[in-house]
Image (tube, grey):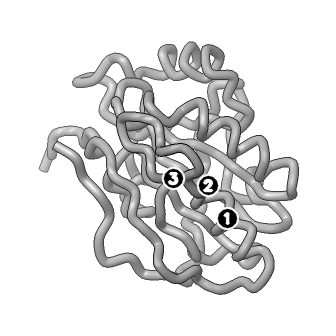
C-alpha cells in the first residue's frame, strides 16, 4: 500500500544523526550538509517506487552536488523482515546504481522517527540554515517514468531555496512504500 507524508512542519531544524555508510565511514548531518542546502532522502533497496526512480535520483543528486548542495540517503527498513534491505545488500545496491552520495544505515530506526519519515522515497530538503524547506517528490514519476518534459521538482525546489531560503509553494508530497518498522517490543 502506498504511503505519503502528512502534516508537514516546515522550518524545523534537521535532526542530527550518526550513521554508518556503505563506504565504511560514519556520517552526521554536518558531514553531508552543503553550502547551499542539503537533501536527505529515505530509500530502500526493494521498493518499486525507489527502483523506478533510483537512476534519476542519482542523476539529480549529481546535479545538485555539483552546484553546492549536500545529499545523503538513509535506509531504515527492518532488514530482519526485509532482508533485501540489509546493510550488505545496501552496499551492493549503492554500487549497482553508482550512488554519488553517502548511503546510510539506520538500524535502530531512531533517525527515521526523528525525521518523521513515512515512505520510501521520502525527501527532506533543507536550506543553508539547516531548516526544512521541502518535503516534496523527485518528479512526477511513480513506478513508471515521468511524462516527457516533466519538471525536475526536487532540483527546482532546492535551487529556489538556495536563492531565497523560503519554503516553495505547491509541493507535491512523495509517495512510496511505507517504512518497514520493526515490531514494537514494548
Quarter where residue 4 is shown: bottom left
| The N terminus - image quarter | top left
Query: What residue did someone put label 1 on?
Result: 156
| Circle 1 residues within 10 Å: few <14, some 14–19, many ≥20 | few
Residue visible at 69% across and 22% down in the picture: 98
Query: What residue did someone put label 2 on?
Result: 152
Q: Which of disc 3 and disc 1 is earlier in sequence? A: 3
Answer yes or no: is residue 111 visible: no
Residue visible at 58% across and 60% down in the picture: 153
**Tag 2 near tag 3, CB within 8 Å:** yes
Answer yes or no: is residue 21 visible: yes
Q: Which of disc 3 and disc 2 is earlier in sequence? A: 3
Give the distance between the C-alpha atoms of the residues marked 2 and 3, in whole angstroms: 5 Å
Query: What residue did someone put label 3 on?
Result: 139
In this picture, residue 35 sits left or right of residue 126: right
Residue occupying the far front of the picture:
148
Amino acid at each position: 500500500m502506498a504511503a505519503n507524508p502528512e502534516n508537514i512542519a516546515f522550518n524545523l531544524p534537521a535532526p542530527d544523526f550518526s550513521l554508518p555508510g556503505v563506504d565504511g565511514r560514519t556520517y552526521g548531518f554536518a558531514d553531508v550538509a552543503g553550502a547551499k542546502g542539503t537533501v536527505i532522502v529515505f530509500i530502500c533497496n526493494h521498493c518499486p517506487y525507489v527502483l523506478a526512480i533510483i537512476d534519476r535520483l542519482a542523476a539529480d543528486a549529481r546535479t545538485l552536488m555539483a552546484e553546492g548542495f549536500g545529499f545523503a540517503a538513509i535506509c531504515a527498513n527492518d532488514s530482519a523482515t526485509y532482508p533485501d534491505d540489509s546493510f550488505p545488500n545496501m552496499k551492493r545496491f549503492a554500487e549497482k546504481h553508482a550512488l554519488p552520495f553517502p548511503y546510510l544505515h539506520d538500524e535502530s530506526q531512531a533517525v527515521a522517527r526523528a525525521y518523521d519519515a513515512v515512505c520510501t522515497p521520502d525527501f527532506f530538503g533543507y536550506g543553508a540554515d539547516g531548516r526544512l524547506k521541502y518535503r516534496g517528490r523527485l518528479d512526477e514519476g511513480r513506478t513508471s517514468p515521468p511524462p516527457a518534459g516533466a519538471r525536475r521538482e526536487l532540483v527546482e525546489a532546492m535551487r529556489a531555496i538556495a536563492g531565497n531560503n523560503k519554503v516553495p509553494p505547491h509541493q507535491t508530497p512523495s509517495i512510496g512504500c511505507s517504512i518497514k518498522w520493526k515490531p514494537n517490543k514494548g
